[in-house]
Image (tube, rainbow, N blue to C red):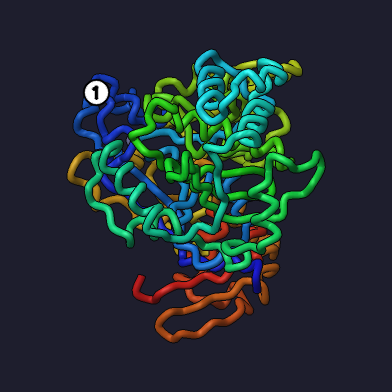
Amino acid sequence: MSDRFVIWAPSIHSELAAKCGYCHGNKEENRDQLFALDSWAQQYVDELDAIEVNNCTMGSFVEHMDVATYDRLCNMGFRRSGKFLYKMDPLRNCCRLYTIRTTPQELVMSKELRKCVSRFVSRITDDGSRMAIVPGNDFVGKIVNAELNSTKFHTKFEPALYSDEKYQLFVKYQERVHQDFKNSPKSFKRFLCDTPFGPESILGTQESWDQLNNWQSMKPGEKLMHMGPVHECYYYEGKLIAITVSDILPSGISSVYFIWDPDYSKWSLGKLSALRDLAIIQKTNLKYYYLGYYIQDCPKMNYKASYGAEVLDVCCGKYIPLKHIENMISRGNLFVLGEEDADISKELYIVDSDNGKGSSFVTENGAKQMNIAEEVYGVDGCAFKSANESVLKLKELYSVPYEEEDSDTIYYQQGQHDQAPRGIPNVVPGLLPLWELLDFMESGKITDLEGRLFLFEVETDGIRPLTNFYSESPPVKRRICDAIRLFGFETCMKSVILYSEQM
Ligand SMILES: [Zn+2]
């Protein structure tokens, strides 16, 4: 059972954009940027102030997940916070959050980053000149050499577990950098120690920690043994000055959080930690550095672009160099890639890209690619009609309780929020579209889940395998369908879905 994906039935949570940690619901005079697409903003142009745009998160609490599954889900736009696995609804949410990743090779060393490395080298070594043998642009070589020769600075990778020393630094950081005074050991644990991974990933082995703590000396091609959550503690002259919280995944390192001592603000520890993580990725023969979400119109988040990067299109699952689409997403817009071989979704497929209104760009290899977000998800987008057609059949033929949704109601007048449909909406970019779900019923593919997917009803405390999808109750069918739409069919083949009749 160690690769089981054990989740609570998925749900959507929406609250006022004022609660959004990025825009706080306030885009000032650019209120139209709260909308995912221009056609929606134009629809409401006369009543922009009266429309409620929310902060919409979808996801599940996860009781168990292996690192390979999380790696796949990260590349579908998910992130985790403690044990909560989530992604945003890019259509209804007030901000467009794009999964962003980079590689050591993609990094362009700006003057600022070069300065950060040379200052670090001179701070931690007695004889900075010894580093002159490393070529100017080789930031990995510079960091590695300096750390191997330093008697003042070292770091330690260790399990993501609580200690008083880490907690004290966390409090100092939260209070002085974020003016957050509501911290407790419990909140620290829930946020930065709790994970859905099994004990083998959390605790690792002595051998795997020894290898990771000597990452500077790993050989090209040598396989990294430790996969899972880590805390990397930075010590300077014996004092803990920073902690990176990360997940090491088969395809790379996913950055979760970074805590630093405000007394060391001159070190530019945030930049340094990104450069060190990229150096670690190169030396440990991993590939990608996942920096979380990128929001083009959020000054707090767009520094990530300076590491050279590509962003994920959640609809087709492909990454696109940020430089190609920067202009298209600069006003908080949704970007959806359309190209000739797009067969991921019928909604994408049925758009005739030659007639598209969307802007286009040409990639290095000469292929023309279109932004077809308006055609699919805009005011007259084809996704809504397609979803409603599927809803009727899902309901009548298979008793799966989806309800038709009026595309006009994806945004609400203030105070009318309780009229919003409950549950995950029928049209969400990046989720498996309803026509495809219907296809699973019609083709019988849904029966592949039988004997593989398990259901756990909390009230009866009973776990059972799914034996016949068609004979399940409508609410159970809906929960299974929502899990498939969110996490994908393959992931559901090894899932256990926990649910409560009351929920
Ligand atoms: Zn926002």
Residue 394, above or below 326? below
- Please report the residue visible at 34 percent of the width from the left and 35 percent of the height from the top: 262
Instruction: Please state the quadrant of the image where ligand 1 appears.
Output: top left
- Please report the residue visible at 63 percent of the width from the left and 41 percent of the height from the top: 346
**Label 1 neighbour load within 10 Å: few <14, some 14-19, many 20+:** few
Give whichever of 70, 350 is nearer the camera. Answer: 70
Q: Position of residue 425 (x, y in %)?
A: 42, 50
Query: Is residue 169 toward the left or the right of residue 281 in the image?
Result: left
Q: Which residue is mark 1?
A: 28
Give whichever of 84, 111 is nearer the camera. Answer: 111
Query: Is residue 388 toward the left or the right of residue 503 in the image?
Result: right
Residue 158, above or below 134? below
- The answer to whether residue 436 shows anywhere in this view is yes
Residue 437, above or below 447? above
Number of labels in the image equals 1
Helix, strand or loop under label 1: loop
Give whichever of 371, 205 is nearer the camera. Answer: 205
Q: Position of residue 345 (x, y in %)?
A: 63, 42
Residue lying at the far top of the rendered structure: 111
- The answer to whether residue 427 shows anywhere in this view is no
Residue lying at the far right of the rendered structure: 221
> Residue 453, located in which quarter of the rendered image?
bottom right
Q: Is mark 1 within 8 Å of ligand 1?
A: no
* Quadrant occupied by the C terminus: bottom left
- Please report the residue visible at 59 percent of the width from the left and 18 percent of the height from the top: 109
Query: Is residue 463 toward the left or the right of residue 211 in the image?
Result: left
Q: Position of residue 13 (x, y in %)?
A: 35, 53
Residue 263, above or below 453? above
